[in-house]
């Protein structure tokens, strides 16, 4: 693991306490990601995972995975595929949200001052707020 990814994983763990990294394929797993209260999702929290691209940080992460069966207003969400074409290396069946960081990706030399794994993971909340 390179120093930047190691530093960003440490930063990610300051916000999400249950983070696992699998070097083979560069997968990040966040346990019990909170879904904002009062929204019509069939879960209040969910495990999520995503893959760090090989050309990171020049190439941002794209999309995120959740365990199969997630619904919003009793419907499958838009821009969501179940089962996921690319199966994460974690137990169970997974679905995939097509998702990018809407504010754009601006990685800098200092991982704490620009876009990073934490800023990407925090945008999943925005996707849940969007609903279906």
Image (cartoon, helix red, strand yellow):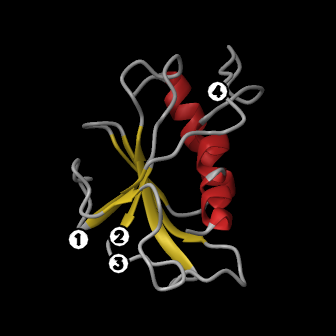
Q: Residue at x 47, y 86 (%)?
A: 74
- State the separation of the CA atoms marked 4 and 1: 31 Å
Nearer the N terminus, badge 4 or badge 3?
A: 3
- State the separation of the CA atoms marked 3 and 1: 11 Å
Residue 119 at x, y percent in the picture: 67, 42
Q: Give the label on residue 105, or none.
A: 4
Circle 4/circle 3 CB separation < 8 Å: no
Nearer the N terminus, badge 4 or badge 1?
A: 1
Nearer the N terminus, badge 2 or badge 1?
A: 2
Q: Nearer the viewer, residue 59 or 8?
A: 59
- State the separation of the CA atoms marked 4 and 3: 30 Å
Determine which residue is flagged by label 2.
67
Left or right side of 8 for 87 = left
Circle 2/circle 1 CB separation < 8 Å: yes
Nearer the N terminus, badge 2 or badge 4?
A: 2
As helix, strand or loop, the secondary structure at mark 3 comes to: loop
Circle 3/circle 2 CB separation < 8 Å: yes
Q: Residue at x 65, y 63 (%)?
A: 130
As helix, strand or loop, the secondary structure at mark 2 comes to: strand
Residue 23 at x, y percent in the picture: 31, 38
As helix, strand or loop, the secondary structure at mark 1 comes to: loop
Nearer the N terminus, badge 3 or badge 1?
A: 3
Q: Nearer the viewer, mark 3 or mark 2?
A: 3
Determine which residue is flagged by label 1.
92
């Amino acid at each position: 693991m390179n120093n930047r990814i190691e530093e960003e994983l440490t930063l990610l763990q300051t916000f999400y306490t249950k983070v696992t990294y699998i070097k083979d394929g560069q997968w990040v797993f966040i346990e019990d990601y909170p879904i904002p209260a009062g929204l019509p999702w069939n879960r209040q929290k969910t495990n999520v995972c995503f893959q760090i691209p090989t050309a990171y940080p020049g190439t941002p992460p794209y999309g995120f995975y959740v365990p199969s069966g997630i619904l919003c207003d009793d419907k499958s969400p838009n821009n969501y595929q179940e089962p996921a074409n690319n199966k994460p290396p974690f137990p169970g069946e997974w679905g995939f949200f097509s998702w990018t960081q809407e504010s754009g990706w601006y990685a800098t030399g200092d991982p704490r001052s620009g876009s990073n794994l934490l800023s990407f993971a925090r945008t999943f909340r925005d996707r849940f707020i969007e609903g279906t």
